[in-house]
Image (spheres, grey):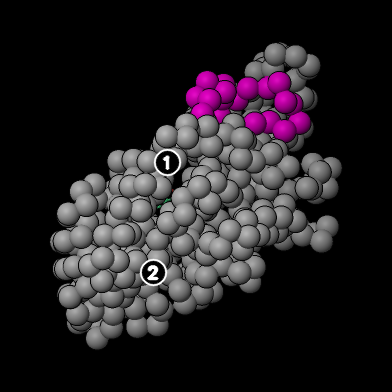
Amino acid sequence: MFSIESIPADHPTPSLLVDADAVRENVTRMQRYCNENNLALRPHTKTHKSVWMAKMQRDCGAVGLTVAKMGEAAVMANVCSEILIAYPTIGQARLNAVANLSKSANLIIGIDSKAAAEMIAQAVSKAGTQVGILVDIDVGFHRTGMDSLQETLDLAEFVDRTPGLELQGLMCFPGHLLPSSDATAWEKYAESMGVIVESFRNKGLCADIVSGGSTPTACLSAKNPWLTEIRPGTYIYNDVNEIRLGVATLEQCAARVLATVVSRANDHKFVLDCGSKTLSSDRCGPAPESGFGYVVEYPTAKVTRLSEEHGEVELVSGVAPAIGSRVTIVPNHICVCVNLQDKYWLFDNQEWTQMPVDARGLLV
Ligand SMILES: Cc1ncc(COP(=O)(O)O)c(C=O)c1O
């Protein structure tokens, strides 16, 4: 991991810094877990939105890439032709983008309604192409996903007989499950999925892909023998959420914000030039009162309040840094932080290089 001393004095702040070696280790560790547990890895690229990072994931063994948005899909298709859109592509602009990209990439889309299936089928038939479909099931997070077995089967059968759509299996997002969830919650996750997969097979419906996984659950995926693949995203950089959940260490947090002390009220309080427009206002999910990020050089500090361009920090011990000093901060939620930056600075082979956040702000 880079040291703060290795950052040139004229490096602009606030800026997002990424350590390439830490990224390589995170990418390799996740791929190794998948290889050892007979799972395919289809990393979610919403965390890094970077072509350079996606190439690394692909070269390390990912079977494809996951995106939420069609703009991200178009960017990532330059790196890998297998793209899972784990988001219902509703709306004419998205459907046009699906039709367009399906001419050059193998798209799979996760959907939870017949309406979505009809709209996508209509869009791709006009383009003379086809896309794969995963039926999105709700395994307990209660966001998207079907929660009735019969309706899930009805949708799968509809997809199966609709030209332009190829049923490839199921997906879910186990966002409610954490490493600390009790054994019953994990059993329920596996059992409910097993019922659906077996029902698919009994009816001759394709369940070749059963896609799940988030960063907190990724390395516990073997507890659900029905999964064929996982789609973690945050693991590439990690953040305070993952540290607090016990799935990452500080050293594994590969992306950090460099900030300058611009004001200092007293020995116990200072202000940084990074506010909500840099760090995002996201609180730490597992520890909401812990502040707005972790100040690496001042472990007892708490980022107590953010304005758009100010980050207020309070110290419980030690003395506040001098005006003009720099610190690095691990954000609570790195995915949102990355999407707020046009560029990031990559530290690789002892050199700093400015890199684009290629799919930044692509929300359609
Ligand atoms: C549908 C879907 N799949 C995968 C992920 C990746 O999960 P994580 O951010 O925990 O790595 C997310 C995260 O929001 C998601 O919404």
Q: Residue at x 47, y 31 (%)?
A: 182
Q: Residue at x 79, y 48 (%)?
A: 2
Q: Is residue 258 left or right of residue 149?
A: right
Q: Is residue 272 above or below residue 248?
A: above
- Of badges 1 and 2, nearer the viewer stands 1
Residue range highlighted in magenta: 286-305
Q: Are marks 1 and 2 in contact (CB under 8 Å)?
A: no
Seen from the viewer's position, the closer of residues 88 and 338 is 88
- State the separation of the CA atoms marked 1 and 2: 22 Å
Disc 2 residue: CB within 8 Å of ligand 1: no
Circle on res. 208: 2
Q: Is residue 100 left or right of residue 218?
A: left
Secondary structure of the residue carrying numbered label 1? helix
Q: Is residue 201 above or below residue 81?
A: above
Closer to the N terminus: mark 1 or mark 2? 1
Q: Residue at x 61, y 69 (%)?
A: 61
Quick one: label 1, few (<14), some, or many (20+) residues within 10 Å?
few
Q: Residue at x 75, y 14 (%)?
A: 317
Q: Is residue 149 left or right of residue 364?
A: left
Q: Amino acid at mark 1?
A: Glu
Instruction: Let me know if residue 278 appears in the view.
Output: no
Instruction: Identify residue for label 1.
Output: 187
Seen from the viewer's position, the closer of residues 60 and 362 is 60
Q: Amino acid at mark 2?
A: Asp
Instruction: Let me know if residue 108 appears in the view.
Output: yes
Estimate the x, y position of residue 299 in percent, counting from the top left: 72, 26
Name the quadrant of the C terminus: bottom left
Q: Magenta segment: does it hold 337?
A: no
Estimate the x, y position of residue 11 in percent, counting from the top left: 73, 48
